[in-house]
Image (spheres, grey):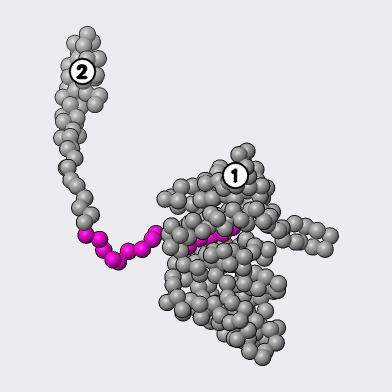
Amino acid sequence: MNCLRRVSRTTGVAAIAEYWLIGLLILASAGCRQSVTAPQTATAYRIDGSRQAIGADERIQVLVIHYTAEDFAGSLSTLTAEQVSAHYLIPAVTRDNHGMPTALRLVDESRRAWHAGESYWRGRDHLNDTSIGIEIENGGYRRTLTGYRAVPYPPDQIALTIALSRDIIRRYHIAPGNVVGHSDIAWRRKQDPGPLFPWRQLAAAGVGIWPAQQRVSYYLGRRDPKAPVAMGGIIDRLGRYGYDVSMQLPAQLRQKAVAAFQMHFRPGDFRGLPDAETEAILDALLEIDAGQGGAR
Ligand SMILES: [Zn+2]
């Protein structure tokens, strides 16, 4: 590319210099000739899509719900200017100037958003690859005189979350058991969307899963809901349901995993103690999964 320009620059220089330069140019042009490659012409082709395989499914398998633990300005700044992101952000005040509830789309659904981090659910890890992430503006925990309290979600914000989630679930055929909180898929380090996120209300609206009280009662039998049960049985059920657990976990981590499950499905008490009600809820959930052919 520079060969011709270098030739013209050599004109008019002293003869002795010209002698050397010509020598150099011969070497340089030889180098140029060696590096020049014939222009590639693209081969014309067409795609024949008339035969379709049955062995395929959606890339998006999981819907992950988060809270931002920041106000709106902070949430937007973090999710747009830092190394974390989500496909959607749902503000606490959900109406824009036209009076229409408005969610912000920060990452196109066709692209990976960086919301899940190290994560696992039902045999898959690195869930950024296979999930849509919704961040909900919520303060997380607020310090009060009597300790830290979870911040409630306004009804309008939940209504918008449900509407958006229903669309996503319908478009990707996401299984009910694959609508999860960040705390379900990364329970070692995450607590969002917290104990006040109304999973039961969402499930009633077709978003996610919630066991029928009748089936929980069936599995509970005559036991006191708070009656202690073996931790091993709870961990085994958590693993079968989809959590990243094993019997090799230290006791403290086993309790933390149980607490994550309880925060989702029994938020009135999520101390992580293995009790009969927790076991019954898990049995009722596993029964739903079995009825759906273990929909994954
Ligand atoms: Zn999160």
Image-based side of 36 in relation to 223, left or right: left
Please tell me how crowded label 2 is: few (under 14), some (14-19), or many (20+) other residues with Cα within 10 Å.
few
Residue at mark 1: 100
Residue visible at 17% across and 16% down? 19
Residue visible at 19% across and 11% down? 15
What amino acid is found at the position of numbered circle 2 in the picture?
Val
Q: How many numbered circles are shown?
A: 2
| Residue 177 visible | yes
Q: Secondary structure at mark 2?
A: helix
Magenta residues, as a range? 51-67
Report, in whole angstroms, how far the alpha carbon at label 1 lies from the one at label 2: 67 Å
| Residue 246 visible | no
User: Looking at the image, is 94 positioned above or below residue 33?
Assistant: below
User: Based on the displayed image, in which of its 4 quarters is residue 205 positioned?
Assistant: bottom right
Q: Position of residue 179 (x, y in %)?
A: 52, 64
Residue visible at 60% across and 50% down? 90
Q: Position of residue 206 (x, y in %)?
A: 53, 65
What amino acid is found at the position of numbered circle 1 in the picture?
Met
Check residue 5 for magenta coloring. no
Q: Which mark is residue 31?
A: none
User: Does the residue tagged 2 have its C-beta within 8 Å of any atom of ligand 1?
Assistant: no
Q: Position of residue 107 (x, y in %)?
A: 49, 47
Q: Main secondary structure of the magenta part?
A: loop
Check residue 66 for magenta coloring. yes
Residue at mark 2: 7
Q: Position of residue 73 (x, y in %)?
A: 65, 43
Please tell me how crowded label 1 is: few (under 14), some (14-19), or many (20+) other residues with Cα within 10 Å.
few
Residue visible at 62% across and 38% down? 97
Farthest right residue in view: 145
